[in-house]
Image: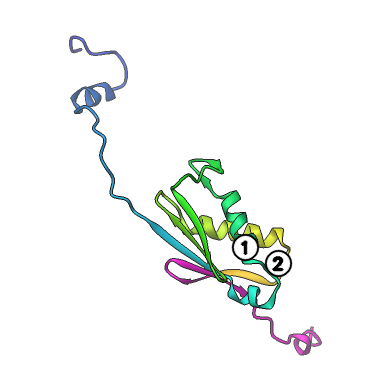
Amino acid sequence: QQHGAAPGPPLSSFARNMAPAKKIQKKKVVKKFAIDCSQPVDDGIMDAASFEKFLLDKIKVNGKVGNLADLVTVSREKAKVIVSAETDFSKRYLKYLSKKYLKKQQLRDWLHVIANKKDSYELRYYNIHDNEADEDED
């Protein structure tokens, strides 16, 4: 037993030898994701503005809705919604929210979210072929 050592887990010796914590200035990493909804918008079954508002209302930052501050921005170019984040933000979370929006608008039966590039998604129609001839065989 060392003198002056607090009884407890062996972590105490590790904490004693650590230098005082310094604030490390992180380089700003801006993640940009795009969601292309041109197909459904051109057909008039979806409104890009309402999708943009939905994302603004639903995106959580640090576990809180409506806490976007300047960390996350949602903008729109015609039928493309662009989300820029200066904080940890996953593309997968954007897919989750997109699917949630489609479900709310009752469009999940016709549209699905597909990754078309590394940093973007696209809302596409399901490929439905004529299956009537196949159904008679069952």
Closer to the camera in the image, 9 or 24: 24
Question: Mark 2: which amino acid?
Answer: Leu
Local crowd at mark 2 within 10 Å, few (<14), some, or many (≥20)? some
Residue 66, horizontal then vertical, whole percent:
56, 44
- The residues tagged by marks 2 and 1 sit, at their Cα atoms, a distance apart of 16 Å
Whether pointer 2 and pointer 1 mark residues with C-beta atoms closer than 8 Å, the reply is no
Assess whether residue 122 is covered by the magenta stretch.
yes
Closer to the camera in the image, 27 or 114: 27
Element marked by disc 2: loop
Residue 45, horizontal then vertical, whole percent:
71, 71
Q: Which mark is residue 107?
A: 2
Q: Which mark is residue 49?
A: 1
Name the residue located 28 percent from the left edge and 49 percent from the top edge.
27
Question: Mark 1: which amino acid?
Answer: Ala
Magenta range is 114-138
Q: Is residue 5 above or below residue 74?
A: above
Local crowd at mark 1 within 10 Å, few (<14), some, or many (≥20)? some
